[in-house]
Each structure stands twice: as C-alpha cells, then as structure tokens.
Amino acid sequence: MDNKRRYVRIPLEFEVKFKITSEDEYKELKNKRQKKLLYLTNSHTFTFSEEGLSNIALKSIIRLLIHLDNKIDNIYELLTTGNKNSKDIFYKGIGMDISGTGLRMVTGKNLSMDTLIFANFILSKFPFIYIELLGKVVRCEPIKKGEYSIAIDFVDISHEDREKIIEYIFQKQRRTLREKRTKV
C-alpha cells in the first residue's frame, strides 16, 4: 500500500461549514455546481483593482462581506433550528490542516466513513480565497468527549479551487522560510 501524499499539506486553522448530503443530494449539488461554473466562465465578473481601492479599503470591504455572511448564516440557523430534520442545517468545524486533495477538521459531529458532505470555507481573507467542495469522510477519530477529528477527501472540487489551495500553501511555506532566514 502506497501512503505517499500527492500534495503538500500544511497546518492551518480556519472555520469550515458543512452539511451532510445523501447520494441524490450529492448528484444534485454536483449538477448545480457545474451549471454555476459554466455561467461564471461565460460571464464577466467584477474584480477589485489595487489602483481603484487601497489595500485597507479592500480589506475592510472583505471583512464587512464576511461579517454579513456570518450574520445571515446565524439568522438562517436560528430560523431552521425548530426543524431538526432540516437538510439545510450547516454544522461547523475548525480546519486543522489542508492539502490539494483533502483536509482535516475538528468538529462536534460524529460522522461515519464514506459520509458525503458539502463544505465551504474561507481559506484567506486577503487575498480573498473562498472554497466550495463536495467531499467524503475517510477517517473519524474521537479526540475527547464530544469532539472528533474528521479527515475529508475532496471528491468534487473545481480545478481553479484546487489550484488556489495549492498556491496558498506554497505562499505560506515561502513566508515561513523567509521568516526562518531572517531570524538566523
């Protein structure tokens, strides 16, 4: 059995939101994601240029948008908690490390092997890197009472999102090496 990793993995803490999906929901989400990607590749999107906005203003806008997104998620969660059978409930976890093929997170939800999940997270606020993916649980280990370490294998992630993750990992590694050199 070959246990060599194909991608570099780095330790990194970030919030992960996920929901459990059935096989049918997985197929439906995959179709929606493909349609969305086709729409995005055929449309023009607005991008912030550093000439038009200062880095401080851009960081402030990103923080505001993230704050609004979190508020909307909290309101939605409050509205749906009355329905415990709701398929739209998102659980939260803390990402502990990530690579181009998967991530490990800590959560209060015990998930069985091969459980399909839809997950999203903000890998970096500046530059802004938002990732959405479909994954499969490949390992679940209890850490302590009510906490589990979950390993997720990326089953369906766009090529662009995978490249963003890999690029971000290499940037973090370069920054760490530079910091070590300046300390010496």
Image: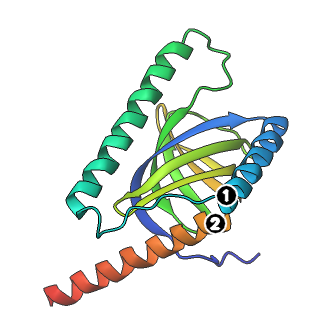
Q: Position of residue 183 (x, y in %)?
A: 14, 85
Image quarter in which the N terminus is found: bottom right
Q: Is residue 5 above or below residue 26?
A: below
Residue 24 appears in the rendering: yes
Q: Is residue 145 above or below residue 171?
A: above
Q: Residue furthest left?
A: 183
Residue 137 appears in the rendering: no
Task: State the residue at coordinates (52%, 67%).
Answer: 165
Q: Position of residue 129 (x, y in %)?
A: 46, 59
Identity, as a three-letter code, of the amino acid under mark 1: Asp
Q: Position of residue 177 (x, y in %)?
A: 30, 84
Q: Is residue 174 above or below residue 19?
A: below
Residue on which the image places disc 2 = 101
Count of labels in the image: 2
Residue on which the image places disc 1 = 153
Image quarter in which the C terminus is found: bottom left
Mark 2 element type: loop
Mark 1 element type: strand
Give the Cα distance between marks 2 and 1. Answer: 6 Å
Task: State the residue at coordinates (37%, 42%).
Answer: 65
Q: Do the residues bearing badges 2 and 1 touch, measured as CB atoms within 8 Å? A: yes
* Numbered circle sitting on residue 105: none
- Pick the residue in front: 121 or 93: 121
- Badge 2 density bin: few <14, some 14–19, many ≥20, Cα 10 Å: many
